[in-house]
Structure formats: structure tokens, C-alpha cells
Amino acid sequence: MSDIEIAFVDFFCNKKVHLTPDIVEYKPGFRTPMYDLIIGKSTMHELGVVLDFKESTIQVDKILLPMRDIANLQLKRSITRALRINSNHAPEPVSTCSATKRVVEILGAKYDKVDLPAIIREKCSNLSATEGELLLSLLLKYDSLFDGTLGD
């Protein structure tokens, strides 16, 4: 058992709710649960949560919002916002916050092998045929930089 204080960020940022959830640990090899926290019906009743499955809405404190798919709840921006609002710690310094944001963007980016000839054809129409060939030759000389993997 543990006491936690959270905010339901889509409904209100300033109001905090105190909960005493049961902590469940999963053994290695079991499927990872989809949810970090499940709020039971007695807690939802205490909080005045109204779930309307016919209309697919959730209401808390007279604020009515649509239910969302779990995939939308697990988007980076949703998680970052929830962690920021629910953090009990002092705000992160601006310098480390911007560095962390940059690293998260880099690691979260999709890296695919680049089709260099296609890029030259599609994006470099301002170059002459000779200039395009010279540029392609240079890029192919360093093609390991465009293989879709992170490097040094």
C-alpha cells in the first residue's frame, strides 16, 4: 500500500486527489500491464466520476470530456504533461529541461535508411545534372551517415 497525490490533468491542474492504491508487482515474463494505475469504482464514486459508455464520455466536477483510446493516453506529450503536473519535486532547471527535451526528441525520432539518389532527384532540382552527380558522389562517399542508425 502507498499514499499518492495526483492530478487528473485533463480535468483540472490545480486540484490534487489523494489515493491509497494497492501496489501489484508482476513477475518477469508476464505481459506488461497496459495501465500504470487503475482506479476502482469506490474511488470513482468518492471523486464523483461519471462514466457514460453510451456517449463515450467521462465527467468529473461538471467537466465533460470524451473517453480516449489507450494509445492516445500513452503519447509522449500526454505522459510528459502528466508527469510535470503530478511531480512533487521542484521544477527542473531550464538548462537540464531543454537538454532532456532535445534528447527525448532525438531518441524518439524515426530513423530510416535514406535513398540518396531519390533525395537528389526530388529535392535538388535547382542543381545542374553535373552538380547533382557531384553531390550524390559526395553523399555516397559518406553513406554510412545515412543508414538509419544513430552514430557518434
Image (cartoon, grey):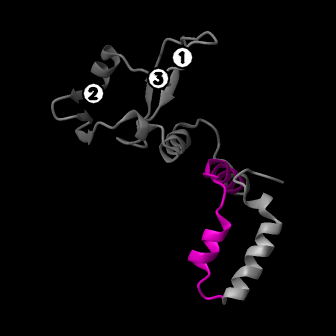
Name the residue rendered at 60%, 51% in the picture: 110
For the C terminus, the quadrant is bottom right
Q: Is residue 113 magenta?
A: yes
Front of the two marks 2 and 1: 1
Question: Relative to 26, is 60 on the left or the right?
Answer: left
Front of the two marks 2 and 3: 3
Neighbor class of circle 1 (other Cα within 10 Å; few <14, some 14-19, many 20+) is few
Question: Relative to 19, is 65 on the left or the right?
Answer: left
Quickly name the residue at label 3.
Answer: 37
Q: Label 2, label 1: how many angstroms apart (C-alpha)?
A: 29 Å
Q: What is the number of the mark on residue 91? A: none
What secondary structure is marked by label 3?
loop
What is the three-letter code of the residue carrying label 3?
Answer: Leu
139 shown above or below 27:
below
116 shown above or below 97:
below
What secondary structure is marked by label 1?
loop
- Looking at the picture, tell me which residue is in the foreground, 52 or 32: 32
Q: Residue furthest left?
A: 54
- Choose top left, top right, bottom left or bottom right for residue 25: top right
What is the three-letter code of the residue carrying label 1?
Answer: Arg
What secondary structure is marked by label 2?
loop
Pointers 3 and 1 in contact (C-beta within 8 Å): no
Quickly name the residue at label 1.
Answer: 31
Q: Position of residue 148 (x, y in %)?
A: 69, 53
Quickly name the residue at label 2.
Answer: 49
The region drawn magenta spans 98-127
- Looking at the picture, tell me which residue is in the foreground, 65 or 18: 65
Q: Label 3, label 1: how many angstroms apart (C-alpha)?
A: 16 Å
Name the residue rendered at 83%, 68% in the picture: 141
Q: Position of residue 64 (x, y in %)?
A: 24, 40
- Secondary structure mostly taken by the magenta-highlighted segment of the chain: helix
What is the three-letter code of the residue carrying label 2?
Answer: Val
